Amino acid sequence: MPPSLTRATAARSTLDSRLLPGLLVTTAGVALAIAVNALVPAVSPLMAALVLGAVTTNLGLSSPALRPGLQFAARGPLRLGIVLLGAQLALPDVLALGLPVLLPVVVTVTATFFGTQWLGRRLGLGRELSLLVATGFSICGAAAVAAMDGVTDSDEEDVMTAVALVTLYGSLAIAVLPQAEGLLHLSPEAFGVWAGASVHEVAQVVATAQAVGGAALTTAVVVKLTRVVLLAPLIAGVTLWRRRTAAPTEGRRPPVVPLFVAGFLAMAALRSLGVLPPASLAALKTAETLLFTAALFGMGAAVRLRALLRTGRRAVALGALSTTLVTLVALAGVTVLA
């Protein structure tokens, strides 16, 4: 074996051994997060993993030996999870909604994304935190936050704050929106559009629409997945903007379409063309959840709660304002449709 190849093999072996302790801890964290979700279904595995990772670090249970593996877990599984997320999208189902539904959804996403960032600046929050909250609230919650974190220089505390806000206000929507449906006298289809266009997480949308059931649930899921489709162009747009505005001295610019976003689009195309066997979709969904859970555990392990608490009140205010914005804009769209 050539000396250069021997050195490369030795370096790879050393790197793998450095990753192993952190990856083992991450695996245990994922298993515990899944168990928490099984005991308390209202707590998603992603949120449970994020909290468990933060607890591990802030109680002094972590060590420098775990850091390489935890840092890898926060990035590698995230990108693969986003690729698999594309398998849940059947574009014909999205297009079947028609322009009268698609247009209000796009308007809601756009207004929430840019409006939340403006509100964040008005509250004195950092640009990165405002961007993450805007992405999570306008698209698909924790997965969107993690995806945007993959193309930005956000602190892990910002990621944890954004995911916590998604969980808090999305959970409130599960209780509030079905009650409002009775007061507003919306049809099941109209309520489905409202829930799908305004509630943050896919699981939260399902829980909200199940209170009405029937056409409301089916419509809400398809509308929500329409928002998920917009994740790819949103990330590409942010990346392109940063390429154009970054100083030349900041190093190599990222690609306009990151590889994991291209993979997301490829999986969506395969699902839409019927190439993926129906029996494989459940397995892909499970793998996606496990990968995102691992990534959120790694992110949580990098969080320092003291730094997080410094932005607490203003971040909570931003979450409340952003939730109000997305809910009212979506409701206005539903009213126009009616």
Image: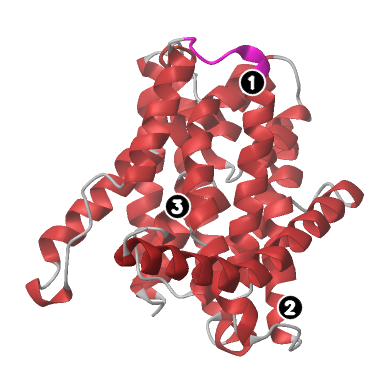
Q: CA distance from mark 2 to mark 1?
A: 34 Å
What number is the disc on residue 56? 2
The residue lying toward the viewer, choosing from 253 and 153, is 253
SS type, badge 1: helix
Q: Residues within 10 Å of mark 3 (few under 14, many from 20)?
A: many
| Mark 3 vs mark 2: in front | 2
- The magenta region covers 274-280
Q: Earlier in the sequence, mark 3 or mark 2?
A: 2
Q: Who's the residue at 39% across and 36% down the image? A: 263
User: Which residue carries the number 1 mark?
Assistant: 280
| Mark 3 vs mark 1: in front | 1
Q: CA distance from mark 3 to mark 1?
A: 23 Å
Left or right: where 290 falls relative to 2: right
Most distant residue in the front direction: 1
SS type, badge 2: helix
- Say above or below: 226 vs 130: above
User: Which residue carries the number 3 mark?
Assistant: 147
Q: Who's the residue at 25% across and 54% down the image? A: 239
Q: Earlier in the sequence, mark 3 or mark 1?
A: 3
Left or right: where 180 falls relative to 318: right
**Which corner quadrant of the image does residue 150 belong to?**
bottom left
